[in-house]
Amino acid sequence: MGMPPSAHERAFGLAYDELRARWPASTEERDVDTPYGRTRVHVHGPVDGPPLVLLPGGSATGLVWFANAPALGERYRIHAVDLLGDAGRTERRGRPLRSADDLTAWLDALLDGLALTRTHLCGHSYGAWLAVRYALHAPERIDRLALVDPTRVFAGFRPGYLLRALPLLIRPTEARARAFLAWETAGTHPDETWRRLHALAATAPGRKPVAGGRPRAADLRAPLLVLLAERSRTHRAAEVADRVRRVLPEAEAVLLPGATHHSLPRVEPHRLDERLLGFLG
């Protein structure tokens, strides 16, 4: 008989289920077995629609795309993933998760389990970093690549952002997670259920996302869209856009007015959806 859930686990489960209820009624939950553990995927859209895999930022869970799912799911079969090593309903069991190579091997197994030979791929923040790593690892499986305010791909973090995040990194508490989120998303009025889930996810026991070096984005071959939060505190968005255009002249780099890093992809989702749908075609 297992241990009863802790107060934190109960609170996280309630917030998770509350946000899950905001997804379209036809959304399916899939648990896909991989050598690293069972992966939770939220699936929505026409069964015969072109596949689109969505990777969230850190502490966000695949549910973070709840505001985008209705529009994206009209045309595409979307698969929103709870990341391995992060909070959510993906289990970390079996093969150890130690490196970025393990993450790409996990995604190989996940796409195999979903029977996706090729797919469009979109990631936000840490999920964008992982999407780039995967597109470089398996370019033959990626049709089009979209990055939403990617971190540690075209630029490092601004020192002020890291300084603000330091107390949360040293001793994670829900109050510190909420304060940090409030600072970065000021003026954007993020969803309260998502804020609660994010704070609980950021302080989840055993949460150990895998980091790695900056990938060689110049070697990307898939058609690329980079959507940048105009008011992102993680980096200077206009400078990142210029760098994208220099490194990959064929890529499209767009600033989303008024958005901050952590307010995406939920705040004013129609802006993001319109750009993404136009790019995917």
Image (tube, rainbow, N blue to C red):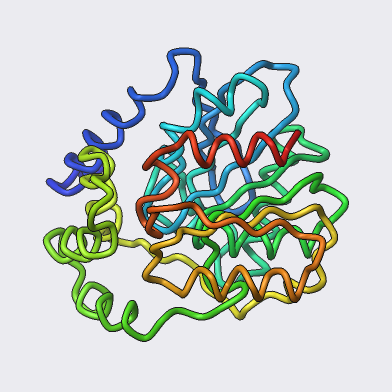
Please tell me which residue is depicted at 49% across the width and 60% down the height of the picture. Answer: 125
261 over 79 or under it: above or below: below
- The picture quadrant where one finds residue 278 is top right
Please tell me which residue is depicted at 60% across the width and 56% down the height of the picture. Answer: 254
* Quadrant of the rendering where the N terminus is positioned: top left
In percent of width and height, residue 27 lies at 49, 20
Closer to us: 275 or 150 = 275
Q: Is residue 76 left or right of residue 256?
A: right
161 over 87 or under it: above or below: below
In percent of width and height, residue 207 lies at 36, 61
* Quadrant of the rendering where the C terminus is positioned: top right
Closer to us: 26 or 71 = 71
Closer to us: 7 or 15 = 15
In percent of width and height, residue 138 lies at 81, 57
- The picture quadrant where one finds residue 102 is bottom right
Tally the numbered discs: 0
Please tell me which residue is depicted at 71% across the width and 41% down the height of the picture. Answer: 279
29 over 189 or under it: above or below: above
| Extreme residue in the top direction | 26
Q: Is residue 55 left or right of residue 158?
A: right
In percent of width and height, residue 149 lies at 51, 60
Please tell me which residue is depicted at 61% across the width and 68% down the height of the picture. Answer: 241
